[in-house]
Amino acid sequence: MLQNEIYKLKHYFGEPTKTALYGVSFNQYDQKEDAVFAVVGGRNVIIGHFENNKTVALNILQTYVDENETENYYCCAWSFDPNTGAPWLAVAGSTGLVKIINTSLGHIAQTLTGHGDANFSIRLWNVITSTPIVIFGGECGHREPDVHLSGDFLVSSGMDHAVKIWSLCTPVIKNTIESSFKAKPPSSLRNQQNQTQSCCKSNGYTSTPLFIHFPIFSTAQLHNNYVDCVRWYGDLLMSRCAADAKILLWKPDVELVASDKSTVTTTIVGGPAQPTSFEMICEFEFEQCDIWFLRFGISQDYKFLATGNQVGQIFLWDLQEIPYFINSYIEKKKLKSTGIKMDKTVNNGENIDKKICKPAVLDVDICDSTIRQVAFSKNRQWMITVCDDATVWGWKLNREISGQQAGSKMK
């Protein structure tokens, strides 16, 4: 279990227009700096930077205000221009437009249109050619995706209480992805990409994408409300539903093996979902959270898990405890397969029914607003939270207080 002082509050600031902030993301692709981040909410995009060796470490680098007064940004994610290496920041919200900002030049590189509004489909795009490749939809649609580390599978969640896994490695999808690189944007778009643009005008175009109607796995038995956050943890999954102060770690009963053996050549990939099951591994419980749209964060090296709640507290877990729960799960599976009566103990004598992983709680009196999202920098040196009251909070890894624990576990 982590000490409560493992991270220490270093900086906080308020968004000037007092608009609620919903999304935060660190640029994990920057090889020079590991603490450039973006926060979004309302019409606003703020890009900042933490410098570890300075007394005043926080610098606001860029700010953008969308020209559409009805826009409300909910999420952001970093990538880069594969031709120049320039950092790209994708932002999206209530209007359904995905806008990609070239932050090195300070302008909109392109706008991807197709969603129409904040609908329930997931779209895969080729950002080199501005081509929509695949639409993952079907009954009820879905949102909140996360891509498996292998790049071969996509998990999604939605308001139908379900978690779904989609294959990205079938022949028809691979062929469609390959073909998308041959597409050329219209001359008007090519000209716009070579010019500095004001934030944020639509310049994208659409083509006919592939429709995927059926996932390879689907379950609505795990949660009883809108599933607003789901993330891969290796081949396992972490998920949380609205109005539930609990994050679940579980194993879907599906084979996650990339294969080219499929003979499917039509746009109807897969078929109606077969009965699916899952196995619970453990639970991460916290307090005072009966709302929806609250997203947890996992550090890039899978060492830390963190989430906020609706009164400004942060709950932080050491994921190095997870192997114990996985071993307990494996032990129970072995005993069940042999038919031997379970004595509910593992080799160290502890109860194998133990499923609760306890957190450290980070709390400051001056923060009492709902924390919508938590994000970690690439090396875990910084952790950022964004809140409904338009504030951004920067927490720094406190090696001095954490002492030997930090030295042994965080190198």
Image (spheres, rainbow, N blue to C red):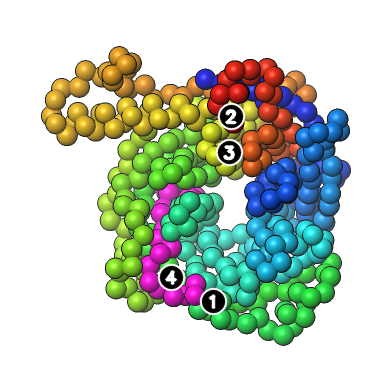
Hey, which quadrant is residue 279 in on the image?
top left
Question: Mark 2 and 4 residues: CB-CB less than 8 Å, in contact?
Answer: no
Q: Which residue is disc 3 drawn over?
A: 299
Contact between labelled residues 2 and 3, with CB atoms less than 8 Å apart: no
Q: Nearer the viewer, mark 4 or mark 3?
A: 3
- Image-quadrant location for residue 138: bottom left
Q: Give the number of the disc on residue 173.
A: 4
Q: Residues within 10 Å of mark 4 (few under 14, many from 20)?
A: many
> How far is disc 1 from disc 4 in space, using C-alphas?
11 Å
Q: Which residue is mark 1?
A: 180
Question: Residue 280 in the image: x percent, y percent?
Answer: 35, 35
Residue at point 82%, 63% (across, down): 105
Figure check: 252 above or below 305: below
Q: Is 238 left or right of 54, judged from the image as shown? A: left
- Is residue 208 in sight in this rendering? yes
The amino acid beneath tag 2 is Met
Q: Nearer the viewer, residue 83 or 395?
A: 83
Whether 314 is drawn above or below 236: the answer is above
Residue at image point 84% right, 45% down: 60
Residue at mark 3 to residue at mark 2: CA–CA distance: 11 Å
Q: Marks 2 and 4, how far apart in space? A: 39 Å
- Name the amino acid type tagged 1: Ser
User: Hey, what amino acid is under mark 4?
Assistant: Ile
Whole-percent x, y for residue 247 in the image:
49, 34
Residue carrying label 2: 410
Q: Residues within 10 Å of mark 1 (few under 14, many from 20)?
A: many
Which secondary structure, mark 4? helix
